[in-house]
């Protein structure tokens, strides 16, 4: 199971980097789906099968497919692709590289202090649903409204040009 965790984590990191570097938006969204599915595998390995299924069904299955269809409907074309390529200059990578290095150092520091002998505890459906529909129900609803507002705003911004 530990090997599966590291393989899924590596796939998630590689797919996320591919999302950032991809200039074709449809390919970037497909890489994002791969990244979300590998995060679902990580959740499953860590002992949260319900969170893994939610990740796969809700994020990779519904929201990303919706984004994919919206972007394919907009059909922004070659001009947008050329504009995105012009944003990927080497000077634009300096600050994100520094911030990523700091985060990587923090991650290595935290991982070096972890005790891997303790297995993670199983998280049940009742525990997750009691939290999602209990004290965090407003946060869940606000997140869904934020996603919907982002989708509507992206549609109107792209359509107005």
Image: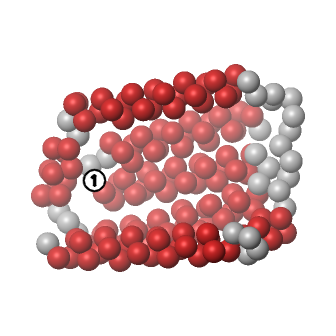
Residue 5 lies left or right of residue 153; in this view the side is right
Spot occupied by residue 153 in the image (x, y as percentages of width and height): 32, 73
Residue 148's quadrant in the figure? bottom left
Residue 45 lies left or right of residue 61; in this view the side is right
Q: Quadrant of the C terminus?
A: bottom left
Residue 95's quadrant in the figure? top left
The residue at 69%/39% (across/down) is 5
Q: Say which element carries label 1.
A: loop
Spot occupied by residue 78 in the image (x, y as percentages of width and height): 14, 58
Spot occupied by residue 39 in the image (x, y as percentages of width and height): 61, 49
Which residue is at the front of the view, 129 or 13? 129
The residue at 70%/22% (across/down) is 112
The residue at 75%/62% (across/down) is 50
Q: Quadrant of the N terminus?
A: top right
The residue labelled by disc 1 is 24
Q: Indicate how the structure is coloured in the image.
A: secondary structure
Q: Is residue 46 visible?
A: yes
The residue at 59%/76% (across/down) is 141
Question: Within 10 Å of the Cα at label 1, are there few (<14), some (14-19), or many (20+) other Cα atoms?
Answer: some
Which residue is at the front of the view, 108 or 122? 108
Residue 113's quadrant in the figure? top right
């Amino acid at each position: 199971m530990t090997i599966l965790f590291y393989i899924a984590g590596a796939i998630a990191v590689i797919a996320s980097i591919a999302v950032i570097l991809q200039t074709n938006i449809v390919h970037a969204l497909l890489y994002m789906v791969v990244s979300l599915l590998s995060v679902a595998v990580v959740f499953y390995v860590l002992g949260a099968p319900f969170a893994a299924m939610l990740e796969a069904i809700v994020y990779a299955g519904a929201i990303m497919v919706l984004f994919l269809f919206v972007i394919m409907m907009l059909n922004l074309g070659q001009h947008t692709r050329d504009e995105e390529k012009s944003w990927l200059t080497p000077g634009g990578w300096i600050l994100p590289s520094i911030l990523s290095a700091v985060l990587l150092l923090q991650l290595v520091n935290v991982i070096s202090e972890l005790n891997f002998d303790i297995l993670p505890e199983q998280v049940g459906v009742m525990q997750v649903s009691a939290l999602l529909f209990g004290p965090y129900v407003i946060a869940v609803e606000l997140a869904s409204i934020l996603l919907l507002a982002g989708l509507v705003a992206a549609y109107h911004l792209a359509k107005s040009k």
